[in-house]
Amino acid sequence: MPVPFETLLPYGIIIVMFGATGTGLAAFKTWQNEGKRPRYSLDQWDRVSQLMDRDRRLTGTLRGQSDNPQAPFGFEFTNGWKLEKRFT
């Protein structure tokens, strides 16, 4: 017994909408990460303390990386912490 095509239209619409949503979210995530693949399984070291903060200070963006062997001006120290004056 044949199935009328009208019964399959909702399933086709649902499949197309899932595909469009998935493609849109993937494109937005790629655009947000400057055309690079997203970073997964980031721990505290990567996020806050060292890696991504260093990239941001070197290049101005969280995902940017630099292969310049000379540190830019204002990057004399490896950390971005300000030192306080010692009491003497």
Image (cartoon, grey):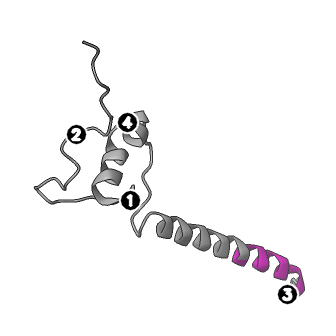
Q: Amino acid at mark 2?
A: Thr
Look at the image and give the residue range highlighted in magenta.
4-16
Residue for badge 3: 5
- Badge 3 density bin: few <14, some 14–19, many ≥20, Cα 10 Å: few
Q: Which residue is mark 4?
A: 49
Residue 63 lies in what quarter of the image? bottom left
Three-letter amino acid code at the position of disc 3: Phe
Residue at image position (33%, 35%) is 81
Q: Nearer the viewer, residue 63 or 80?
A: 80
Tell me the quadrant of the picture where the C terminus can be found: top left
Question: Can you identify the residue that label 2 sits on?
Answer: 78
Q: Image quadrant of residue 80?
A: top left
Question: Tag 4, which secondary structure?
Answer: helix
Location of residue 54 in the rendering, given as x and y in whole percent from the top left corner: 30, 47
Q: Nearer the viewer, mark 3 or mark 1?
A: 1
Q: Which residue is mark 1?
A: 61
